[in-house]
Amino acid sequence: MTEVVHTPRVFSGIQPSGGLTLGNYLGALKRFAEMQDTGGMQTIYCMVDLHAITVWQDPDKLAHATRELCAGFLASGVEPEKSILFNQSQVAEHAQLAWIFNCVARMGWMKRMTQFKDKTGKNAENASLGLFAYPALMAADILIYHATHVPVGEDQKQHVELTRDIAIKFNNDYGVDFFPVTEPVIEGAATRVMSLRDGSKKMSKSDPSDMSRINLTDDADAISKKIRKAKTDPDPLPDSIEGLEGRPEARNLVNIYAALADLTPEQVIAEHAGQQFGTFKPSLADLAVAKLEPISTEMSRLMQDPAEIDMILRRGAMRAREIAAPILERTYEIVGMVR
Ligand code: TYM
C-alpha cells in the first residue's frame, strides 16, 4: 500500500474561552509567528471553538472570543498570507476524524490525562463527556493535516504525546504507515509562564485574580502595575542561573524578560546580576509595555471590523479543507467505510 509522504507541517490551536494571557502569547502566539518565517514549513493555526464548548460557553461571548482570538493571532504577527488561519468548527473533518480516534484511544490512556483531572478535581462525574474526550479531538486537529510539528506550551505536552500514541495505534491496527508521529515543539524561555501572584501556579485565564496574569488586552498602566506588584522574594537577582533555584517567582520574571527581549535567561541574569527587584521590575515593566501595548492597540483596531475577521476565517477554512478532506477520505477507506 503506498502512503502519503509526511512533509513537515506545523499545526497548533488556541481555545477561544476567555481572553489571551501573556502565557498564551509567549508560549504560543509569538512562537507561531516565528515559525511561519523560519524552517520553510507550512503553518496551520486554529481557533478551537469545538474544544471551548467542553465547558459551557455563552454563545454570544464565544463568538466574540473567537473573533478576538483571531485579532490576537493577527496582532501577534501571524499573517493569513503565510499561514492558514481559521476556526475549527468551519472544518467538519476535525470532528469526523475525532470520532474515529475516539474508537482508537483507550479509556486507560484518557484517564491518565492530568489536565482533565486538574480541571474537574472532585467533580469529574459532573464534567461533560466532551471534556473527557477532548484529547482525542486534539489529536484529530493535528493529524487531519498530517502535521509533524506542534508548537505548544509545556502544559500541552501530555496531549501531544497522546496524539503520538493514537497515530501509532491506528497505523498498527490497520497495518498502514498513514499518520505521522508528531513532535511537540516546546521551545524558548517561556514555555511555562507562571502566575504573578504565585510562582508555583501556571498563569491562566481562569485564575480568579486578574493581578495574577497579564491579559493581551491590558493597557500600559495595567501591565506596569501588575509587574510592579508581582510577588517576589527580598533577595537581589543572583549572578548565575543556578542562583534562581528555589526562587520560582524570580525565575518567572527572568524568563518573561528573556522571552520578551529575545534573550536567553542566562543573558538576562548576566545583564541584571545583583539588581534589586525595585530596579528590575520597572525595566521589565517598560519592556513588557513596549512589546505588548502595540499588540493590544492592534487588537482593538482589528475588532472594529468583525466582517473582515470573519472573511479571513472563512478563507482560511477553505484552504484547510483542501488538505483535510482527502486525508479524511483516505482514513475512511483504510477503516473500511464504503464510499
Ligand atoms: P490553550 O488554549 O489552553 O492554550 C493555548 C496555548 O498557550 C499555551 N499556554 C501557555 N504557555 C506558557 N505559559 C502559560 N502559562 C501558558 N498558558 C497557555 C498552551 O500550552 C497552548 O500552546 N488543548 C489546547 C488547544 C488545542 C491544541 C490543539 C493545541 C486544541 N487542539 C492541537 C495544539 C494542537 C489548549 O487548551 O490550549
Image (spheres, rainbow, N blue to C red):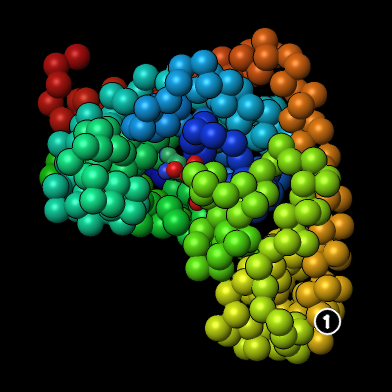
**Whole-percent x, y for residue 267 in the image:** 77, 77
Q: Residue furthest top?
A: 307
Direction from residue 273 to residue 162 in the image, left or right: left
The residue closer to the viewer here, 46 or 11, is: 46
Taking depth in this image into account, of 82 and 302 the one nearest to the observer is 302
Name the residue: 35% across, 57% down. Answer: 158
Q: Position of residue 299 (x, y in %)?
A: 74, 30
**x, y percentage for residue 182?**
39, 51
Nearer to us in this view, 102 or 24: 24
Figure label count:
1
* Mark 1: few/some/many CA within 10 Å (<14, 14-19, 20+): some
Tell me the residue that label 1 is attached to.
275
Q: Is residue 303 visible?
A: yes
Picture quadrant where residue 308 is located: top right
Q: Measuring 77% from the left and 46% from the top, which residue is drawn there?
A: 222
Q: Residue, x 22% and y 29% (percent of image)? A: 99
Answer whether residue 168 is visible to the viewer in this image: no
* Residue 102, picture quadrant: top left
Residue 221 place in picture, x, y as percent: 83, 46
Element under label 1? loop
Q: For the point 19% across and 14% down, which residue is it?
A: 339
Q: Is residue 259 left or right of residue 329?
A: right
Q: 47 or 80: which is nearer to us?
A: 47
Residue 74 to residue 235: above or below: above
Kind of residue indicated by mark 1: Gln
**Would residue 66 appear left or right of 162 to someone viewing this image?**
right
314 w.r.t. 127: above or below: above
Quarter of the image for the N terminus: give it: top left
Q: Is residue 245 above or below residue 35?
A: below
